[in-house]
Every structure is written in structure tokens, then in C-alpha cells.
Image: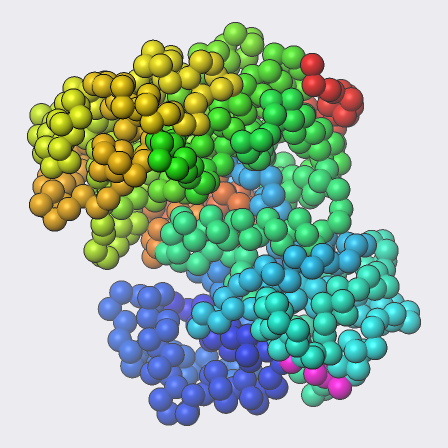
Amino acid sequence: MGAATTAALLAARAFGRIEWMGLSHQQLVRVSLMLGVDRAPFELATVVRRLASPGATTPQLAEEIRAVLQRFAYDPVKLAVYGAKAPVELVGHLLPVELIGSPKATVGPSHHCEKDLLLADAHLHSGASMGLETLIRMLCLSTKSSPPELREVVGHDEIGEPYSVGVIVAALRQFLIILANQTAGKAVEMPPEIMAKWVDGEFWACVGSAAVIGFKDAAVDHPFTWDVLSAVSSVPTATMWDPIQILHKFVSDSVAFGDMRQRRLCEGLMAALFLVNRFLRSSPGEGLPSFVDRFDQMGLLRDSSVSVGRALAVAHSVDCVMTEEQVVAAEFRKSIGASTGTSLADLEQKILRSLADHLAGFVGSSALAAAPRRLSMPVTFLRTRERLENGDAPALIHSLQPLWRLTSAILNVLASHREIGAYVNAVDVAGDELAMPNWVFVPLLDHLGSVGAGTGRTLVRSCHAGESFLARIQGLRSIGELVLPNRVVERVGHALALDRITSDFVLGSDNREYSRRSVVDDMCWMIASGIHAAEARLLLERIVADTNLHAGGIVVEDMVGAWISRRSVSGFQRLGLGNGIEFPPESVTADTARLAGGEQLALLLLTHRAPFFPFDVLDVPLGDNLTGHYEEMNADFGESIAGMVVEAMKSDVVIEACPTSNMRLSGLPRVAYLPIERWQNLGLQVSLNSDDPLIFGSPIMAEAELVGRYYAERVLASLSRVSTESCCAGVEESSTAEYVVIAEMARTATVV
């Protein structure tokens, strides 16, 4: 495992609990590291076992832990600083490597990633593409007071205790501003409550207690009220200071020769950084639903604490991604919020405004000033957990109208603003596929592919799929329904279900409960695609019989026909559901439902729900009598189904691999478990991407370094070729001067 990794784990234990924030060195050692001295290494060994080499025993781990503790004299800060030297893929979720390690150059070429190897990143989300250092800089340089809702952004420490991330972030900003002013020899203008706790060394202890109560509504008598912590202080100008340099110097000075008070402040600072990092960074094996929640909370933290314009934030993101000239292209995806009440004109305006911000950000990027690049802003459809209710009448399970209207808005922008619209080169579907499955987006992706050609542009269509699933067949169907029986994408994000080894980690060993609706979708897809159709028909017939759908006039052929109709706008319209791309029905009347029959009723059943038969028979567990049948199919046919999906993807579809993200979310213990090389050996086209550096801590250069460290040169060379060919497809390489022209056009663009 290595001494640095062990040190990182020990430091994370010391700084991982909100109640310990502000404790002295001796107190931290007593409560977190020594744990009774003799038994401590054995107890800590259980914490680090999952990162140890296979076959390592508890006594071996205990000896390694004891050696590291003695080497650093049980000093939590020294453990943290040394732990930052460990590989980021092992410790990035534990400690803020960028903030507490020795200042170092950005990740550049090495013997694992040659200078002439070109890279591109097509799997970035605009708001999460900056680094942690950049977020802290933007936070500290903000000139606005933090809004009250920021204190309600909540994280959980290592034992699950909630704390207000907003309180800690606001305090971190004030702390670094004090340091900056003192370093510059300037008078510090701060609320007296803050300065009093600074002088006596109790600043972080007070912050810790404020963070514990900060997410609650109850009025508590505390010196660090929200008004105190969020006050606009004497912020030095950006030219006077760099918050990250100030932070590094304070930590190194404290370790080298700090007095007791300075050490106490440094230990509290370290705890704050650890807890912010814990909130932002994805943890091993946390799964996609937890990541989606983290992403949403991260966005709230970023937007409510940073006052710089969106264009500047985009510029910082470009610079964080394109740290070397060999990174030649990047797509910064932008999710466009759409709700039932959002008009078509409003959505078009949102797209144009986001384009203007991104193009202005490209202009402001120092990376672009160094060399021409290909940059674009795909529009992302976000999956949500929203489900409609319509009283006693059938209602759509998921709201389609806003998504269909956004589809129209995208096409209108491309048709009316051809020059700036060229930078919307792609559309993407992202989010938790268990919360909102692919069938919601398949007809829209199909429509964008067929109608997009009429705009003179061919949109690249991408969808996250096969990343989160409860059964292998479910994950394969999530990927497979994008390419079979007809293809509606050119790229698939993650696609982990294609690989048996990775699937085993995603699924784990927990008992799972399958819903009838999901299994019906699986079987309909298999029958429609000709994949083990006879076996799929047998299980679907059993479900139809078990739910008594025959009494409603529905047979297996109706279910499969309706499933196929659901894949296109024309299919909805053919069965009387929808009269145009902008206005699909949000609900149907009870009378319409009662009069429907056969395939039309089956389509209603596949897309709607209601508290009466037959709309109440699918959103329930599969049942013990059918679960065994379904699990046998997964065991018997999982690999052959995967093989058929692979064959359908070989020539026309790129898999967007994101190594650190895939390891972190699925719980893969080592890089060797990643399916990249196995996919390449099967003839699949695979690109290399980073997937949200702010959350995973690994920009594209670091991802290339990681892959190059563990795989043969040909693996990385193939990733480079596919990445640079598929990223920013249709977008020309441009210089800053050329982006200035197009950015001005975007700034003045209006809805036609």
C-alpha cells in the first residue's frame, strides 16, 4: 500500500469528524490515532484493509501503520502533508492533495504520457470542470457576501454526522483573507467576534460548533452567527495575493516552526480542508445515485459562494483541463434546466445565453491564448426524479413535455443561428438511469438525429448508460436500447455493464429487488432486438399472466409493439399520444384509458401509471415466483447478450471511458480492473475522458498518466486516436482572435 497512502488514511481519520475540528495536536492524537496505544494499529488496520495488497494480514498492516506513526511522531498535519504524495487515484477522495501537498507544476508529460500524444476530453460538465484550487481561489476572491441558503448545504463526516459545508467554506474564506492581509502588512477589517477567536487560537473550534448547528433552523446563541461568517471583509485585490500560495505557506511554516497557537490554527485549517474535500469528492463505491446528489449539492455550493461571472468560470475550467498543448479539444457540456412552465422561447434564450458565456470564457482562457484549440458546448438533458401525479386518471411516469420542448429549442437555435450554433455540436443525456430510464430520451435522440440533418448539421448524440443497474441484463438493456433495434447515439458514456468483471463490482453482493416494469422493459428489448427472443418471450408471457393483463386485452405482441412505438415521436403519434414534438401529452383522461385497447393500451401502460387496473400492476416488485426465472436468465445469458450489444456498437459507437470516475463509483479496487483494454480487444472504439475534475480530482492529463502507468503503449495510443477524432466533431480548431469574433456574435444573438 505504501507509507504515503497509509499516512493519508491516518490523517483522514484524524481530520474526518466535525466534532474534532479545532482540537489540539495532543487531543487529536489521543482521540483519533492512538486509541489506547496498544490496540490502535490493529483497529486502524481494519480501516485500511481494503486498500492493502491482496493477502496482507492484520499484523502486517498494523506494523506498517505503527512505523508510519512513529516516523511522523503521531503528528496529524505531517501525516496529511506526506499523504499528499500518494497516487491521487488512491487518496484523492481522502484528502485535498492539491491544497496541502507541496506546490507543484500542473500534471505534464512523463514517460507514461509522451509529449507527442494528443488528448481530448469529451466528457466534461461545465460547472465541475475546474480544479479544487480554482474553486478556492474564486471563493476567496468573491466580493459578495455568502447567501443564507449556502449554510444549508450539508455534508456528512466519516461517522455520518451532518455539518454545514457552507459554514466551513465561509470561515475558510475569512481565514485566508486574514492571512493574506497579515502577509501584506495590511490592517485586517473583520468582525470582532472572528478576530477574538483568531487571537486566542479558538477560531476553528468555534467554526466546528457553528457548522454542527449551522444546518439547523433553531436559533442558537453562538459567536459565529451566519451574519458574522458571511460578512464582506477586506478582500485583497487579485493582483495582491493568491489564496493557494498563502495556504501552502501557512501550512509549511506551521509544520516547520509554528508556535502552539499557529499549530492549533493549522490543525483546524487542515480539518476544514478535509471536510470540504470529503463533501466535494466522490468516495469509492458510492454509486451513481449518491454521486448525482453530490453533483447537485456541489453546484449549489459553487453558485452561491462565487461571485465571478460565468464566462470567467468557464475560462478557469478550460485552463484546468488544457494544462498542456497536447490537450487539443474539449467539450464543456451545459445542462439546460427545463420545467413544465418553461416556454420554448425561454429555453432558446437559455441556450443562447449559455453559448455566449462559454464562448466568452473560451476567449478569456490562457490555454487558448497559448495555442488554437477545438472547444464546444454540447447541451445536456438531465435525468430527474420528478414523477407526475394526476389523481384518478393515468399520468405519465416521467414528465416529457419540458424535454420535448427543449429538443425543439435546440433545433431552433441550430437552424436560426448557424454560426454560433455550430458550437452546440452534440447533445447528451446524464444522471441516474435508475431514476429516469433511457426510454424517456430515446424518441428525442432519434428525432434529433433525423431532423438535425435538416438544419445542415449532424448532431453527435451521447447518453450515459450501463453505469448504474440492479441486474446485468438491466444494465445491458440500458446500453443496448441505444443501438438496438435501431441506433440513436454515436457515443455512450461509461457502459460498464458490457464488462462482466466491472458489472460484478457495480452489482455487489446485496440482495436486490426487481420491479416488474424494469423486467418488462428488459424482455421487450430482447424480443424486439432478436436477442434470446424465445427465452425473453417465455418470461414476458409469465408476467402478462401473473398480472392478469389478458383481462385488459393485452398480449405479449401488444407489449412488444408498444415498446417499439415508444422509441419514436411518430410511434407516439401513431397510437394517438402526442400531436407534435413540442407538445406530448402529460396525461390522458380516465375515459381515454378505458376506451384504449391492444397496443395503444400497452403503450399507455408502458408510459403511464394510475391507481387502478391495469396501470397499477407494473410498479411493484417482480415477485418471488418470477425473480428466480429472471436471475437464471442473467446468469445464463448475460455474457452472450453483452456480446451481441458489442457487435452492434463496434463500427458506429464510441465508449467514453472515464477511469477515475469508473473506479470511484463502481468500487473497482485497482486500475487493472478497468475494462478499457478488454473493450479494445473486442474491437470497440474507446475514448479517454475525465468526468468532472472537481469531483474526481483527475483532469485529462492525469487520466492519461494513470492509464499509461498501467497499460501498454498501444492502449493509450488507441485512446488518443479515438478521443481526438470523436471529441468536438464538426468544430474547427480556432485561435483566441477567431473566438473573439464568434463570441461577439453570441453576445448579441436573440431568439428569432
Could you tell whether 657 is left or right of 241 in the image? Answer: left
User: What residue do we see at 49% from left, 36% from top?
Assistant: 382
Does 124 appear above or below 95? above
Q: Is residue 274 left or right of residue 498?
A: right
- Where does the image place residue 226, in percent across and percent down from the top left? 72, 67
Identity of the residue drawn at 74% across and 28% down:
736
- Quadrant the C terminus occupies: top right
How many dots with numbers?
0
Residue 541 image-quadrant placement:
top left
- Relative depth, front residue between 4 and 712: 4
Residue 671 part of the magenta-drawn span: no
Instruction: Provide residue 700's location: percent of width, then percent of height.
Output: 53, 42
Q: Position of residue 273 (x, y in %)?
A: 61, 67
Residue 328 image-quadrant placement: top right
Name the image colouring.
Answer: rainbow
Relative image position of residue 701 (x, y in whole percent)? 54, 44
Pick the front one: 121 or 221: 221
Whether 671 is drawn above or below 401: the answer is: below
Does 75 appear above or below 175? Answer: below
Displayed quadrant of residue 175: bottom right
Q: Is residue 568 visible?
A: no
Left or right: where 412 falls relative to 398: right
Q: Residue at x 35, y 35 (%)?
A: 392
Q: Which residues are magenta?
A: 200-205
Frontmost residue, 341 versus 60? 341
Q: Quadrant of the N terminus?
A: bottom left
Report the residue at 70% width, 83% height from top: 202
Residue 406 visible in the current orientation: yes
